[in-house]
Amino acid sequence: MNIVYVISARIPSERAYGYAVTKLCEEWGRAGHTVKLVVPDRKHGLRDDPFDYYGLERTFTVEKLPSSDRLGKGQNSRFGFFADLFSFARAIRRVRLPEETVIYTREYLVSFLLPAQHLFIEMHTTTGNRFLLKRALKRARGVIAISNGVKKSLVQLGIDEKKIYIAHDGADLSAFERVKRDRSVWQAFGIAPEKSVVLYTGHFYEWKGADTLAKAAKLLTPDAHVVLMGGVDAEFEKFQKEYAAQNVSILPHQPQAKIAEFLKSADVLVLPNSAKAEISRLHASPLKLFEYMASGVPIVASDVPSVREILSADSAFFFTPDDEASLAQVVRAVLSDHQASERAATSQTAVQKYSWAARARNVSAFLAK
């Protein structure tokens, strides 16, 4: 099958979407499909080769189209966004897309620039202009929902349930098989290896709930050290200013190749999704969730429906969303529970069906059908 994946966002990126997009393309290529990723050629931000940046095999090709980069210059406004999108749209119209090629995107606005005959849209939430969203989805041949919560919202919008396929995010299981637990990795950040490391990886957006863990740190025992890893730009600076403390380390975004080692070397992994935002409460399928599961380390997770789609009381420990006291109480209990490893083992077994290879295989079967 020939697949062209089109997005208007920069690649590579420190944001999770960049890894998710390229990893799916890599696995499709490994499976024997001919895959091309079409992206704008942004002049600002990361300029690394995406294959080197993410540690990917060159099983697909990348075509970068000339485009403006007002957002990269710091013009973070609706005008900057739409100016960049319009510039990319002009470039897209000059790309030849053979009739039998499957066209795949995760941006419903971009989908209007693409032929509808073999168009598939991957949806991560249903926020945005409802009129345009419904129009985009109805002209698509199929829709890939990142979670059951997203599927339910799409059906409520009037999208035919038969054209929706659920495909949660995944993890690179081989990356976790290659590395071992090594407590010394924390010394590079000034964290004593005898400390119990309570780790969060990912961005610090409000709906991610990282601030709840930062506040919970004050309620933990002195032998616990909280690590929030993954912030960039203003969000990183804000957290450093507000939450850095003797038992809290605020660390910037780390290379994807190192994530498995960090996760396996922690004592507790925290998924603190906020219940205040619909995307977090109902729609999210966080990459970190599946990477946490693959690590074999106990997981403490926010008790929201999006997380409950994947985890249960047999595979994780739950706390009340947006409640730092509840989170601290559960973390303390897990650190003193010698049987916590049993739930971690259950989680590690359950993640086997959420590999990137499995996701690519399942989605490509839907595309073909």
Image (tube, rainbow, N blue to C red):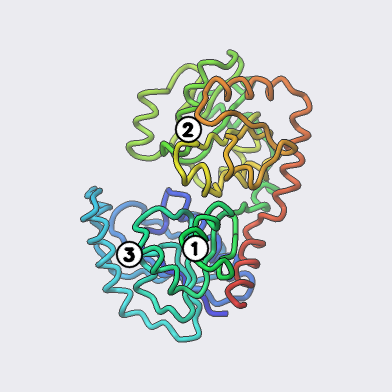
Earlier in the chain: of badge 1 and badge 2, it is 1
Residue 210: give its label: 2
Q: Split into 4 quadrants, where in the image is the C terminus?
A: bottom right
* Element assignment for label 1: strand
In this rendering, which labeled residue sits more in front, label 3 or label 2? 2
Q: Is residue 287 visible?
A: yes
Q: Amino acid at mark 1?
A: Glu
| Residue 181 as seen in the image, left or right of residue 255 | right
N-term-proximal mark, 3 vs 2: 3
Query: Who is closer to the viewer here, 137 or 33?
Result: 137
Look at label 3 and name its amino acid: Asp
| Distance in Å between CA atoms under marks 3 and 2 | 32 Å
**Rendered image: mark on residue 122:** 1
Q: Residue at x 46, y 56 (%)?
A: 18
Q: Amino acid at mark 2?
A: Ala
x%, y% of residue 126?
Answer: 44, 55
**Marked residue nearer the N-terminal end (3 or 1):** 3
Q: Which residue is mark 3?
A: 41
Horizontal placement of 65 versus 6: left or right? left
Residue at (65%, 35%) from the top-left corner?
A: 299
Q: Residues within 10 Å of mark 3 (few under 14, many from 20)?
A: some
Depth check: 247 or 214 in front?
A: 214
Distance CA(mark 3)–CA(mark 1): 22 Å
Q: Is residue 55 visible?
A: no
Q: Nearer the viewer, mark 3 or mark 1?
A: 1
Q: Residues within 10 Å of mark 2 (few under 14, many from 20)?
A: many
